[in-house]
Image (cartoon, grey):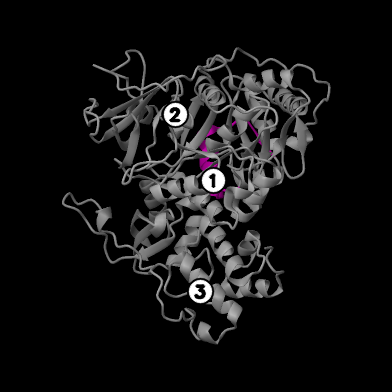
Amino acid sequence: MTSLAHPSPGLAPPVEPDGLLHDLVRDQSLRTPDAPAVSDATTFLTYRQLQERADALSGHLADAGCGPGTLVGVALNRSVDAIAAALAVLNAGAAYVPLDLSYPMERLRAVVADTRPRLVLAGDREEAVRLLGAEVPVTAVDAVAPTGTGAATRMPRGRVEPDAPAYVIHTSGSTGRPKGVVVPHRAIRSRVVWETAAFPTGPGDSVLHRTSLAFDISLQEIFPPLATGARVVVADDDGQRDPAQLVRLLARENVTTLALVPSLLRALLDEDEGLRSCPRLREVFVGGERLDRPLHDRFLRHATARLHNMYGPTEYAIDATYWTCRALPDGQEVPIGLPLERTELYVLDDGLNPVPDGTAGQLAVAGDQLALGYLNDAEGTARAFPDNPFVPGSRMYLTGDLVRRRADGALEFLGRADDQVKVRGHRIELGDVEAHLLGLPGVRAAAARTFDEPDGQGTVLVGYVVPGPEGADPRALRRAMAERVPAPMVPADILPLETLPLGPTGKTDRTALPEPRRAVQDTPRRQTAAGEASVGSADETAQAVVDVFAEVLRRPEVGLHDDFFDLGGSSLQAARLVNRLRKRLGRDLALATLFEASTPAGIAAVLEEAPRARA
């Protein structure tokens, strides 16, 4: 039987893919010890200083018994220290487990229960202990000082092989509990080596790091530049979620390489100057969501950088395919492209047999970047990573994604074959959302589905509940979900239903679940709280804020005291709201303001005192 793999032509890795991930960084630190390695808003480190900080932490980890076969939590926000901590764990021979402290306590403790880390490295020890539990051993990275001697790091206790785990990243699971994907050094190093050959960076280049360590895109932002002598620029919170601030950061730091989701790229292009104010920007990688044709064409018209559409599951070390965007014939969608080096792609039917080109089938991936499987889940691993019938003695991963192969070998993404969805670049199991909804007080039955926003603005997640006799308040349910799951898993709307629609087999028919009525009306918008006057009687600024709330959230009614996030607003919609208010009112408004004053009344009060926006 013929393998349907199409290796990428002409890309010979400059270094051996087999080896350990952190050795790439150590080798570079020996070549350019005094070159800038990483910087954030408060700290700037050379390669020598970064290595010394990581070595000091790895020595502490070794003393605590962390080495091959152990897991170590990294509970730090994006920062120089977070990068040093991840390197330290790898130096010690252990695998790191990202613990994003912005996640709800329940989610964090589920990850801790699954991984049982030997130790957790944290920035704020007290906050980490509060969120993770007093029984988890936590060390503050500030308590471990670099020696400054430049001495070689202590060797791990036991040999570390390329097939040893490098990190464990948790994704949404259909049972309501996150599942940990275990990725070995061989897999992630192969991915890094491929990028350093295909899209080289080096001294003088700057790569933006804006993604939480809890997502594997963060490794693309950190390790390829540190393996080639470039600098990693760490974005602060405003710099990673506010498009206007992000554009200024890209220009100020002379960023040459950027990775982001298409919905954020769209927000950057919506800024007045867009990416035209970033002349050094050379490569832009998008992934995590479908890159639609209008956004693709808009970028090619207005930007000078190259745009690359990337695709890959967490189970295959960041990416399995890539496509460098170019002009396309009318009516043709943007493909997810061709395989990375040492990667094989199979388009299969339900019996795992290859289908002809042009025919839809499930995508399976195999090759050097394959994960080891799911932590503590042998059954799930066996189901998702079956033996590869085309290469005896190897395995492949069944992605659950439907694709078809074009005549030129590129793949087109068609959708999902199961209940997994992508919301703002985050992989979510609808069953996970439903399990958490069902666990809320007053809910007898629950369902969830997604809808595409108009004009390519992304995907919106909607929850449905059948309330018990005592009833259920949708806004209270949203707040309760926000305390239990990461933000992308919180439905933008929760709709009460008398019953859930059922299909012929008696299962919930998600396709019959109603779309929320969110279309904006042209009639004057009135207050939704009892006893309030209409917006028409409020001042001009408040009226404008209410109008923009309704436009962005696509709601027919918004009240002066309605909370943006209670109405289902996301962080990207928040950025869109701030951008429109700046343009409409000519006032300089920081995105952070919306997280402090999240109602039209609150924002209007801030805007009255705000300075005029810069031209």
Q: At label 2, which amino acid type do we have?
A: Tyr
Chain part drawn in magenta: 102-122
Q: Identify the secondary structure beneath mark 2.
A: helix
Q: Crowdedness of circle 1 by 10 Å Cα count: few (<14), some, many (20+)? A: some
- Which numbered disc, 2 or 1, marks the residue closer to the eye? 1
Residue at figure coordinates x 67%, y 46% from the top left: 251
Closest to the observer: 62 or 113? Answer: 62
Q: Does residue 307 appear in the picture of this structure? A: yes
The quadrant of the rendering that contains the N terminus is top left
Q: Which residue is mark 3?
A: 547
Q: At label 1, which amino acid type do we have?
A: Ala
Query: Disc 3 and disc 2: Cα gap in Å?
Result: 44 Å
Q: Which residue is mark 1?
A: 303
Q: Crowdedness of circle 2 by 10 Å Cα count: few (<14), some, many (20+)? A: many
Q: Which residue is mark 2?
A: 316
Give the mark nearest the N terminus, 3 or 2.
2
Closest to the observer: 225 or 90? Answer: 225
| Quadrant hosting residue 389 | top left
Residue 484 sits above or below residue 58 on the image: below
